[in-house]
Image (spheres, rainbow, N blue to C red):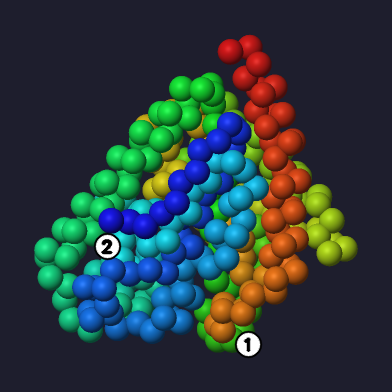
Amino acid sequence: MIDFDLKIGKSRLMVAAIHNGHQIRPELLPYLNLTDKEREREEDPFTSELTNISDNSLNVFTSRFEVDINRPKEKAVYRKPEDAWGLTIYNQEIPADLVATSLRYYDEFYECLHRTFNEILAHHPWLIVYDLHSYNHRRDGIDSYEDPEDNPEINLGTGNIDLDRWGGVVNCLEYTLSHYNFEGRNLDVRKNIKFKGGYFAKWLSMNFGNRVCPIAIEFKKFFMNEWTGEVNQNQLDHIRQLLISTIQPVISEASELTKSE
């Protein structure tokens, strides 16, 4: 099964780190062509350290290289290099029964999520979801940096949100993030530059409509070295404080938008 931790509290905010995981079940390991470091580089390490800002949290510990829950089912198991940033993932073809097992775990995960979100929404008219990710910006080498114009420090993916209903919440989040004093400066925060959001957010909107506002929050890996895996803990702690600073404004804006309901 997919290894994950799901905590349910009373908040109207859910914080998720669905790509933090690095675990792969033992029977798949002989087929992997990638080292731990190569896998970790395309995962989202340290995002799980940011989820405890709310009493609703989701942390996935299974690696996206086993099954990627942020992709539709037919693309959830990487098969070829073009599925995974040009990487040669396997040293031989994975047996069909192992792929089928991964896809069964995928289904079971989403069945569990469906029950959980129904439970939360039985107590709240709406829910905000922070779908946390991180992304690489030094693909050509450890000393190479991609153009900042195309790589904001925080990318907000809004492609799966009912903006007629939740646009004010997205704007509030963008404003709060971009005006926070982050070590004496403001971060570059923009919408839909690198990513517009993945299947997890799409699934939330498909299943719960405008009762859920799923915002994909993608941090450029400026807080870590994406090649060595070394993290700047001070910056990671500041990112956590940055996210905390958004909660009250975002929840207040959502409450104002829905007060007539």
Foreground: 26 or 100? 26
Foreground: 148 or 94? 94
Q: Residue at x 75, y 69 (%)?
A: 234
124 over 140 or under it: above or below:
above
115 over 143 or under it: above or below:
above
* Mark 2, residue position: 77
Q: Is residue 235 visible?
A: yes
Q: Is residue 188 visible?
A: no
Q: Position of residue 87 (x, y in %)?
A: 35, 78
- Amino acid type, mark 1: Asp
Q: Position of residue 74 (x, y in %)?
A: 24, 54
- Amino acid type, mark 2: Val
In the rendered structure, the answer to whether residue 20 lies left or right of residue 107 reads right
Q: Residue at x 26, y 53 (%)?
A: 105
Name the image quarter holding residue 39. Answer: bottom left
Of the image marks 2 and 1, the number of the one nearer the N terminus: 2
